[in-house]
Image (tube, grey):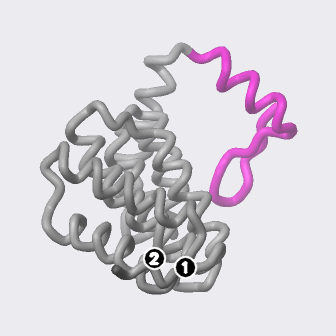
Amino acid sequence: VARRSRDDYQFDHALLRDAAYGTALNRVRTTIHGKIIDLLSGPFAGQVIVTPELLAIHCEGAGRIIEAVRHLRTASAQATSQGAFTDAEAHLRRAQSLLDPKTPEHAVELVSVYSTLGAVLMQTLGFTDETVLECYDRANALAKTCDADDVEIARALWGIFTFQIVQGAVD
């Protein structure tokens, strides 16, 4: 069913892995994900190469949504720095899906996610695509309802300004 390779355990088939995972109680899964996060960010932090996407998966599984979102934002930044804008967008969309804008702490994170997503979409869709403006407008609107910091507010306003300037809609 499972075999041990040099560094880890692997299931012989993905369906077996999914079945084993699916039959575990939610609290057991949450505990396991939490322990993995604690190990990867604690005693083994310097010994294991860990991607932010992997950390995000385990944070999400452990119910640590804000941590998961921050790891997804890091993954997005790494993808952006490598010119992988589609991957960057996917990480941000995943982060967006985890957050509830009605929760104040989530709303603050969502402002940053929307501002960053707007910048990524400028690269893939163009500076004047309406989706870009929607991201920055959402970031700006959310920033007014939560305790977003001034840098995030400025990023949202810069995005709206850039959209308007490039589109030629300056009055």
Q: Give how far apart the Cα atoms at labels 2 and 1 are.
A: 6 Å
In which quadrant will I find the N terminus? top right
The residue positioned 28% from the left and 44% from the top of the image is: 107
Q: Amino acid at mark 1?
A: Phe
Q: Amino acid at mark 2?
A: Phe
Of 95 and 165, nearer the camera is 165
Of 62 and 115, nearer the camera is 115
The residue positioned 77% from the left and 36% from the top of the image is: 2
Would residue 86 appear left or right of 102 to someone viewing this image? Answer: right
> Does the magenta portion include 18?
yes
The residue positioned 14% from the left and 62% from the top of the image is: 149
Q: Which residue is mark 2?
A: 163
Q: Is residue 50 visible?
A: no
Q: Quadrant of residue 160?
A: bottom left
Q: Which residue is mark 1?
A: 127
Residue 166 against residue 87 in the figure, above or below:
below
Residue 103 against residue 57 in the figure, above or below:
above
Q: Which residues are magenta?
A: 1-24
Q: Position of residue 153 (x, y in %)?
A: 22, 65
Q: Position of residue 146 (x, y in %)?
A: 17, 45
Q: Position of residue 72 (x, y in %)?
A: 46, 58
Please tell me which of labels 2 and 1 falls first in the chain. 1
Q: Which type of secondary structure does the marked residue at label 2 adopt? A: helix
